[in-house]
Amino acid sequence: DVKVTQSSRYLVKRTGEKVFLECVQDMDHENMFWYRQDPGLGLRLIYFSYDVKMKEKGDIPEGYSVSREKKERFSLILESASTNQTSMYLCASSRGTTYNSPLHFGNGTRLTVT
Amino acid sequence: QQQVKQSPQSLIVQKGGISIINCAYENTAFDYFPWYQQFPGKGPALLIAIRPDVSEKKEGRFTISFNKSAKQFSLHIMDSQPGDSATYFCAARAGGSYIPTFGRGTSLIVHP
């Protein structure tokens, strides 16, 4: 069974801090994604990666960056956290571009920026 | 703009009733339509998916109905149970793409 593990369940940070959210998947998936989930706005894609060291901006990349140095690990970085980045962050992975490759999500990191 | 519009935003159903969630899309390049189910404290997980070459797909109490000409698809949950209480997301993906476009989600509560 695919497992996507997010390192922190809850995180509280101060405005201006640099924040790292870590995600690891154990199924050798090529694709990895970072979403944020806010009530009424659904799942919004921040960044995705289709290979090691490759990254593409999603719909809301401003204020975020990512790093993928190893296939199994995808990190989301908030360069200078702001209160409007308080949200639930979800990492996901999927296998290549095969037709029926679903996204497998982690259980999320709830980030609060004060 | 929303490429996949989902309604309603919230839904309350009595146990044993039918829950219906609707989605509409504009992009005719979409050719794969999954539904994800998210329980509180968990990430979304694939529930059921359909391709546009069929009009209906059923898995247990869950059925997707697909209307290609209207560019609409819906999830029906028959005999809804309290354990079905969750947030449901419809999604659509274009051929050759590995990035789904999600609807905004429907919070379903099934009362016992």
Image (cartoon, helix red, strand yellow):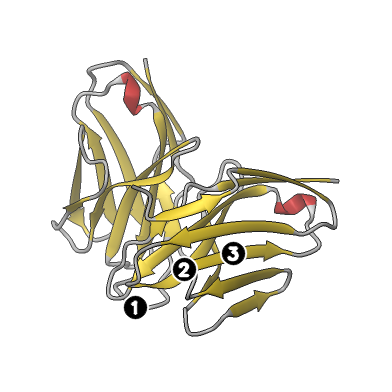
Between A112 and A52, which is closer to the camera in this rendering?
A112
Between A28 and B34, which is closer to the camera in this rendering?
B34
Q: Quadrant of residue A108?
A: top left
Q: Chain of mark 2?
A: B
Residue B74 badge:
3
**CA gap, disc 2 and disc 3:** 11 Å
List x then y, in percent, for residue B59.
66, 75
At x 33% / y 28%, what residue is drawn? A85
**CA gap, disc 1 and disc 2:** 23 Å
Amino acid type at mark 2: Lys
Q: SS class of the residue under badge 1?
A: loop
Q: Residue furthest front?
A: B70
Amino acid type at mark 1: Thr
In this rendering, which labeled residue sits more in front, label 1 or label 3? 3
The answer, for residue A3, to whether it is visible in the render is no
Q: SS class of the residue under badge 2?
A: loop
Amino acid type at mark 3: Ser
In this rendering, which labeled residue sits more in front, label 2 or label 3? 2
Could you classify mark 2 by the number of other residues whose Cα lies within 10 Å: few (under 14), some (14-19), or many (20 or more)?
some
Between B47 and B20, which is closer to the camera in this rendering?
B20
At x 55% / y 73%, what residue is drawn? B66
Q: Which residue is mark 1?
A: A98
Q: Are marks 1 and 3 in contact (CB under 8 Å)?
A: no
